[in-house]
Amino acid sequence: METLPKNGNYMIVVKASGEIVSTKLTKQPTLEQLRDGVGGDIELVPFFNKFMNRECVAFCNAYGKMNGLGFNPTAQMFWSNAYGKRIYEDHLVGDILIIVGSPSFLAQL
């Protein structure tokens, strides 16, 4: 994914394989869609509030580490970019789901 439009709401899945899948949202995603994006129960990724200079909310699989999901270096890089420095204290595993949108759209999640 080279760029992200400056407007609109998107659901982006950063797969552990490095593949990035983006879907334009016309309405709020359902809990089922969020769970499908990460492959199970969701957990908010702290301090992951920017993606390609857009406001966002990011979710991971709540039990990903316990279930042995693989490290996701692409998502880790995006998380570090959002935080403003490299994160050593924790790491992201499995597929990571990012919702990008306006502040009012994100507040409804």
Image: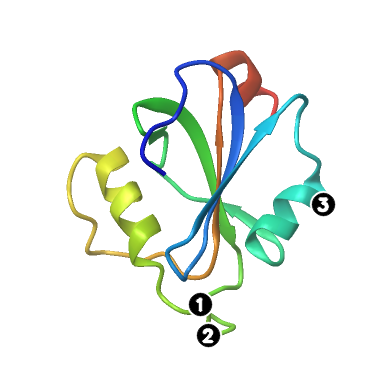
- Percent across and percent down for residue 25 are 70, 30
The Cα atoms of the two marked residues, 1 and 2, are separated by: 5 Å
Task: Tell me the SS state at disc 2.
Answer: loop
Which of the pair 104/26 is nearer the observer? 26
Identify the image's colour scheme: rainbow, by chain, secondary structure or one colour: rainbow
Tag 1 and tag 3, C-beta contact below 8 Å? no
Tag 1 and tag 2, C-beta contact below 8 Å? yes
Q: Amino acid at mark 3?
A: Glu
Query: Residue at 61% across / 64% down in the picture?
Result: 62
Q: Amino acid at mark 2?
A: Gly
Which of the pair 17/89 is nearer the observer? 17
Does 80 sit left or right of 14 as displayed? Answer: left
> Which residue carries the number 3 mark?
32
Task: Tell me the SS state at disc 1.
Answer: loop
- Percent across and percent down for residue 30 are 81, 41
> Which residue carries the number 1 mark?
65
Does 9 sit left or right of 82 as displayed? Answer: right
- Percent across and percent down for residue 99 are 58, 37
State which tag comes first along the sequence, 2 or 3: 3
Task: Tell me the SS state at disc 3.
Answer: helix
The nearer-to-camera label among 1 and 3 is: 3
Are there few (<14), some (14-19), or many (20+) residues within 10 Å of tag 2?
few
Which of the pair 46/52 is nearer the observer? 52
* Numbered mark located on residue 68 in the image: 2
